[in-house]
């Protein structure tokens, strides 16, 4: 049995900010609008720009955790260039 070489993970953005609920909601709205109209959005930090351009089909994960008084809600989406479609989930 031979080992296949796994590609190295390259972290392009790793940032945590403190925002108000309104600021955070506005950020989510900007991302959503850019994805709907252009299919991509750009994260800018100083002079560094990262264009995030997902494929048409995504794998999406929603995660809500509670530990004592701390709550965490994560939205993560992944995609593969030229890869398969996945099932969707709706919010009602």
Image (cartoon, rainbow, N blue to C red):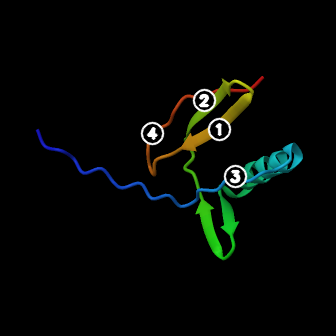
- Kindly identify which numbered label has been placed on residue 75: 1
Which one is earlier in the sequence, the residue at label 1 or at label 2? 1
Classed neighbour count for the residue bearing mark 2: other residues with Cα under 10 Å, few (<14), some (14–19), many (≥20): few
Q: Give above or below for 33 relative to 71.
A: below
Mark 4 vs mark 3, CA separation in Å? 19 Å
Q: Secondary structure at mark 1?
A: strand
- Kindly identify which numbered label has been placed on residue 88: 2
For residue 70, which quarter of the picture?
top right
- Kindly identify which numbered label has been placed on residue 3: none
Instruction: Tell me which residue sits at (50%, 36%) in the image.
Output: 85
Q: Give above or below for 79 relative to 37.
A: above
Q: Which residue is mark 4?
A: 84
Instruction: Tell me which residue sits at (58%, 42%) in the image.
Output: 77
Q: Secondary structure at mark 2?
A: loop
Which one is earlier in the sequence, the residue at label 1 or at label 4? 1
Which one is earlier in the sequence, the residue at label 4 or at label 3? 3
For residue 25, which quarter of the picture?
top right
Task: Classify residue 78 as left or right of residue 26.
Answer: left
For residue 21, which quarter of the picture?
top right
Q: Which residue is mark 3?
A: 35
């Amino acid at each position: 049995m031979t080992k296949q070489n796994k590609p190295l993970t390259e972290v392009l953005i790793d940032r945590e900010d403190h925002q108000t609920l309104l600021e955070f909601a506005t950020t989510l709205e900007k991302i959503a609008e850019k994805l709907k109209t252009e299919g991509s959005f750009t994260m800018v930090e100083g002079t560094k720009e990262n264009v995030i351009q997902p494929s048409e089909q995504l794998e999406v994960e929603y995660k809500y955790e509670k530990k004592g008084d701390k709550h965490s809600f994560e939205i993560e989406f992944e995609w593969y260039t030229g890869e398969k479609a996945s099932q969707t989930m709706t919010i009602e």
